[in-house]
Structure formats: structure tokens, C-alpha cells
Image (cartoon, coloured by chain):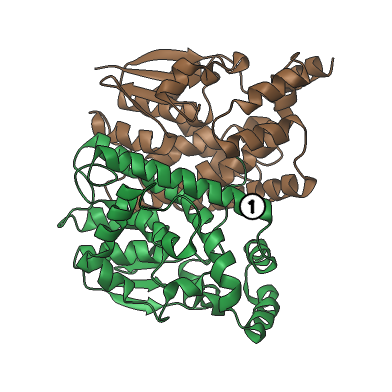
Chain colours: A brown, B green
Amino acid sequence: MSVELYFFQPLGTNSGRVFLALLEKGVPILERELDGLTFEHLRPEYLAINPRGQVPTLVHDGRPLTEGAPICEYIDEAFRGPPLRPADLDERCNMRRWCRYLDVDLGRAVMMIHWNRIVPAFVGARSPAEVQHLIARVPDPDRQRAWRRAYLQETAPEELTESRRRIDAGSERIEKALARTAWLAGRSFSLADIDLLSFYAFLAKWTPEIVNERSTPRTMEWIERMEERPAVRELRARSRMPQRPPMLERMAATARG
Amino acid sequence: MLDLFHAEPTGDSARVLIVLEEKGLEFRGHYVDVLALEQYRPPLVELAPGGDLPVLVRDGVASAGASAVCELLEEAYPERPLMPAGARERWCMRVWQKHVDDIFASAVSQLAWQAYGERSLPRPARAELEGALARIVPSEERPRWQTALAGYAEEQLARAQARVEETVARIEAALAEAEWLAGPMFSLADVAVFAYFNYLPALGGARLSESEAPRALAWLRAVSERPAVRSALARGRSRDPFRTATPAPEQIRWG
């Protein structure tokens, strides 16, 4: 039984969490990579299966499933393989709280800072009119607004500062949780760990001033344990671009011209 | 033993109250006066430091976050199920819950606060509340209160209205396919959407007429008439719980 997965490279955030959940579960994946640079996710063929024009989309039994968090729970329920949700109900509730926090709160703080840094470089050599035209095609109004604000560099400095504050507060909260238990939601590995890896752990490379051996030792130890998992190794092998700031800096420099 | 700390039976508090009633579970309800900032004071502040409501305490363990708590109740007390059996129907149910958590809750609450919140707050209470913000409300929660007390911006309210209209259209489309939002059975999806949708007729506004949203309105009546829903909604203190609107939950900050 295989599934089709529409996703972006490199395998991070929402594409990464679903890809990793499938690998952990041992589900064979038919890869349907979309090229974000040419806005393939806004083509009519893709909008027909994902009207919000977002990645990833999982196609199982010929029918599409969208939205990262619900897809991950679906994967755990629809396929055999090791469980991705704790058996203990309080831990499971805790897992859902973490998944939501990582996705829509902490993850968005990281995303705000990141997009403001890379979107101007990402759209590359296109003319401003062409970029505005592409942005106007983003179906979701909030996502469209985020694109425009990042492209025009309109995000208020206070908002970026607030995002940084949330990342610092979140780092502390994660460190505390990992000091109490081996995995984020409790004693068992779960979707919360998959989301922590997908939405946060790359900060150890991007912003080592926040995530490092000295200030977040438990998190660093957890990252090491995660990177040893066969499914995570497989994810790294299939993720094409190194997720490092030097690459982003080069992209930004190229864009500046 | 189950204890539930809840506000007026609207929004997230209504969601968990309805689930408890639908399942016929015995619980002790503790009313929390949000505009008196009781959620930031003991004993609540020890159970949920962020001021989240409702808070469920089950065998000494406190849990917050309406979707997570509703699913916890479903998993712990599976009799009288509110979750479909199939993985795809469950996915559909969770997409609805996520839509409520991400978008609908905040959009409806902004419109409700604008319509009622300001009016429900007498002037002396307002001055007192403003004074109490700095003393009682955690600093990261303060901007949400300050924004609400200042009144939401026109542009913000227009966005909320558009989100509500988009959601009504989505409900209408879903109900053309099945009796309930996530398929043939009443589920946590219906509970989540109803808890906010229930505000809409009183708020007025476009696109909620019999001609434009006939299925959504019939669904709203069907949910309202369920005995468990009636019992849950009777747990408020105010004669009209809608008139005790509270500041909206935070909107997702970045697309």
C-alpha cells in the first residue's frame, strides 16, 4: 500500500512532518515534488486537489487529504506500523497541545522571521509587477498577506521582536519539558517530536545563539537522539538542500545583485 | 472525578460542556468570570498559567485547549461516541476542529466583542479592568486585552466578516454532502463549529438568510434542540450569554 505525497524540498516544516510520519510508519511514498520557485503549487491541477494551494497533500485510495496536523493523525490511524501517539491518554492530550503550539504559535514566529529574510531572494529576478501578480494568486487571504508583507518588507520591527521573544520563551519551555521526560509529550516518542524536529530543531544550525549545548543542553541531546532514528536518517537522505544559513545568505546576496 | 472550570457557555467553554453533557458524564462545573480576570488568579493560574479556558481536571491532571480536551474526553469515555470510526472521517472532523481553532473562533469572537463586549462592560468596570491589566494579566496576554478594549480596527473586522462568510459557505457545502459536518454522525466537528456559529444569527450580518444558507440554518436548529446542548447552554450565569462577550483569542500571527 503506497501513498502519493505532494511536497516541497527541502523537507522541513509541514512537508517534513508528514514525510517523516510516513517514514516512521514505514509507508512507501510516491514522491510528487512541487517546485516552489516556479509556484507549481498555484497551478490549477494542484489547486484542484488542494484548494488553499498549500503543501503537503497526501493522496490515499485516490482521494486527497490536506492540513499537516490532521494528516499526521490520519497516518497513525490508517496504517500499520509503530504507533506515533502515546497510549497514555494524558500524554496524548499533551501531544496534541504541543503539536498545535509548534505549528501555529512557535512555528509561525520562526516563519515570520524566516520569510522576511528569504522571500525577497526567493522570488529572485522577477519584476515587482510579476511578483505581485503571483502573490495575488495565493488562495488563502492570510497566507497572501504574509507573502506580501515579507516581499515588501512591511512587517513592523515590533512584530519581529515579538516573534524573537516567543522563540526565546518557547526554547525555555521545550528545554523544561525535555528535562522532565525523554520525549516532548512524555515517555513515548510521538507526533510532538516529529513536529519539534520539523518546526524548531533546525534553529540549532540557523541560530546557534538560541539553541546550543550551553543554554539548551537537553534539546541538543534530544536532537542527537532524533538524528539517529532510521526514519530521520532516511528523511535527511531524501531532503535535497542543506538547511543552513550560509545557503540563505548566498541566495540573499544573489538577489541583491 | 471530573472538574471543569468554564466561562459562559459560548465558544470553547460551550464545546467542552456540550461534550460532557452528550456523554452523560458527571462533573463539577466551576464558573469563571473572565471579565473579572478570574482565569489569571488562583486557583486557575496554577492549573493553566496562560489564562486558557476551559480547563478540565481529570483525576488530578489539568488539561486545556478545547480540541485536545474534547478528544481526551472521547478517548477516555468512548461510550456515546462523538468521533466517527473511520480514519478519513476522523481526518475530516479534525480539519473542522482546526478551522475553528485557527480561524473561526477568533473571527466570530472579534465580531461578538465588537457587538456586545464593549456594551456589556459598564464604565466603572472598564476603568477597573484597565487598571487591573498591568497588575494581574501576564505580560504576554496583555496586548490581546488592550487591542480588544481599544476596539478592533475596521480592516480587522472586515477580515473577520469575510472569514465568517467563507466558513458559512463551507458549512453549506459540507451539509449538501452529509447530514453532519464530518459525515453521517454528529461529531466533535459539529460541536466545535456550533459553539461559535451559534453567535451568528444574533450578530446579524450578511449571508445567513434562509435563501443563502438553508442547510446551515437547519443544522443550527437541529444542534440547538439536542437535550445535551440545551443543558450545556443553561449553565451560564447571564440571562443572555452572548452579551458577555470576551476578548477574542489570538489570531494566527503569520499566514
Q: Is A238 situated above or below B227?
A: above
Q: Residue at x 73, y 29 (%)?
A: A151
x, y percent for residue B8: 42, 73
Nearer to the camera, A244 or A161: A161
Q: Residue at x 51, y 33 (%)?
A: A198
Q: Residues within 10 Å of mark 1 (few under 14, many from 20)?
A: few
Q: Residue furthest left?
A: B79
x, y percent for residue B159: 59, 48
x, y percent for residue A119: 70, 26
Q: Residue at x 70, y 50 (%)?
A: A162
Q: Is residue B217 left or right of residue A10?
A: left
Q: Which residue is mark 1?
A: B156
Q: Residue furthest front?
A: B211
Q: Is residue A31 left or right of residue B59?
A: right
Nearer to the camera, B108 or A8: B108
The amino acid beneath tag 1 is Gln
x, y percent for residue A121: 74, 21
Q: Is A174 situated above or below A42?
A: below
Residue A158 in view here: yes
Q: Is B68 situated above or below A205?
A: below
Indicate the quadrant containing the N terminus of chain B: top left, top right, bottom left or bottom right.
bottom left
Quadrant of residue B6 in the image? bottom left
Q: Residue at x 37, y 40 (%)?
A: A190
